[in-house]
Image (tube, rainbow, N blue to C red):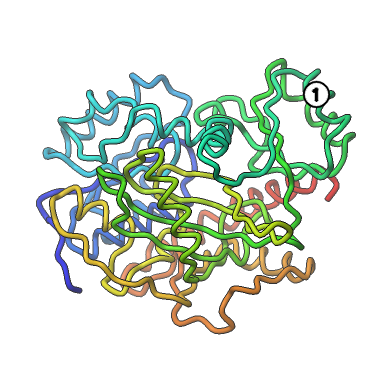
Amino acid sequence: MPFSADHAVPALIVKFGDYPLHHGGVGAIRSLGRLGVPVYAITEDPYTPAASSRYLRRAFVWPTTGTEEPERLVEGLLRIGKRIGRPAVLVPTDEEAAVLIAERQRELGEAFVFPPVEAGLPRRLASKQGLHDLCVEHGIPTPAAAFPESYDDIERFARTARFPVVAKNREAFVRRARPAVNGTTRIASREALLSLARGWGERPGVILQEYLPREEAEDWIVHAYFDADSNPRALFTGVKVRSWPPHAGMTANAYVVDNPELADVAARFIKQIGFTGIIDLDLRFDRRDGQYKLLDFNPRMGAQFRLFESESGVDVVRAMHLDLTGRAVPEGEQRAGHRYIVENIDLPALLAYRRSGYTTPHAPTRASGTELAWLAGDDPLPFLTMLVRFVRPGAKHLYQLWRTSRRGGG
């Protein structure tokens, strides 16, 4: 590998909320740990896959929900910082962590290292309404959307809307405290929308978004790290082959595919808004008008980030650690044709996609290499731990997600 990391600067994987089967956190632990960086992680309990990784120096058991007061979360992070004993690079794995770090930079700055981002920007990007407004402001294509403030607003929307539509939780933090839907939900009819909306309360925290038909679209992803001047130090593009729940959930199978046009769109948008740090973008290419439409902007590491690595061995987490510790980030082309598989969700996704007949034209017919989310020969325990914890509650969770995606009748 043509570079070495600073072993004197550890990393802390930060997550708020109860989702122990998170392959992204395991990927970050392995990515930095293989370079010799001391890696620490916040875990729900001592028996999560992340806690079992051979590359983890120590797990800090801290069960959180993501609904705690910010002061409590800051205090908890600072206690962990004291126990680590030296400033550590923070690697957030969810929107709540990314937002908190950005908004509490002054308190956290002495104990930790992180990109200097505009304090309010991650919250705005993690907000579906905030992101939509930024896209409109900067001329970035995005699906048409409505932001109802009451049940009456939903009724008025339903009279003229073209179904199906997509419902998503609108804000970070609020999605944990008062979730309106269990993830991205496709709603097939006016009646189904009104039925669901009766349970959303007086102020529904949802966005109702135009549905881009899968028969006329392709799902693309962009992962990148941008330095303090909003310049890309590592930027990758790929195509999502399968997700779970189908067409609406997390990536189950994806390929690295070179897409200079998409890379340019992402880089220009980041430069315009002045973001620094790691990003994970979901876009849908609409064949009807030839546009890449931005669906989601995650201002943090994406769970499938290990799909992407340059020929120099750099992924977005490594790029951030190198840059924040004053080391050069080697340049290199992405590994085109590389494949990523999330073992525990790709099988049900495969069965669902075969029934639907959906295909991804840009996916290579043969992978140049495969990265598994869980199984690694040099670190087998996270995979085994995942299997033990997944079999019963994990299968139930997948079923609940699938039911949610079907509640709209399609």
Task: Tell me the SS state at disc 1.
Answer: loop
Residue 386 point in image, percent of width and height: 48, 58
- Which of these two is toward me, 85 or 121? 121
- Which of these two is toward me, 18 or 177? 177
Left or right of residue 334, residue 82 in this image: left
Kindly identify which residue carries mark 1: 198
Find the residue positioned furthest to the left: 8
**Which residue is found at the position 65% from the left and 52% from the top?**
398
Left or right of residue 171, residue 215 in this image: right
**Which residue is found at the position 66% from the left and 39% from the top?**
182
Residue 49 point in image, percent of width and height: 41, 55
Q: Where 81 sits versus 337, above or below?
A: above
Q: Tell me the amino acid under the disc marked 1.
A: Arg
- Which of these two is toward me, 256 or 109? 256
Locate residue 93: give its quadrant: top left
Left or right of residue 90, residue 406 in this image: right
Q: Where 216 sits versus 38, above or below?
A: below
Q: Where 78 sits versus 189, above or below?
A: above
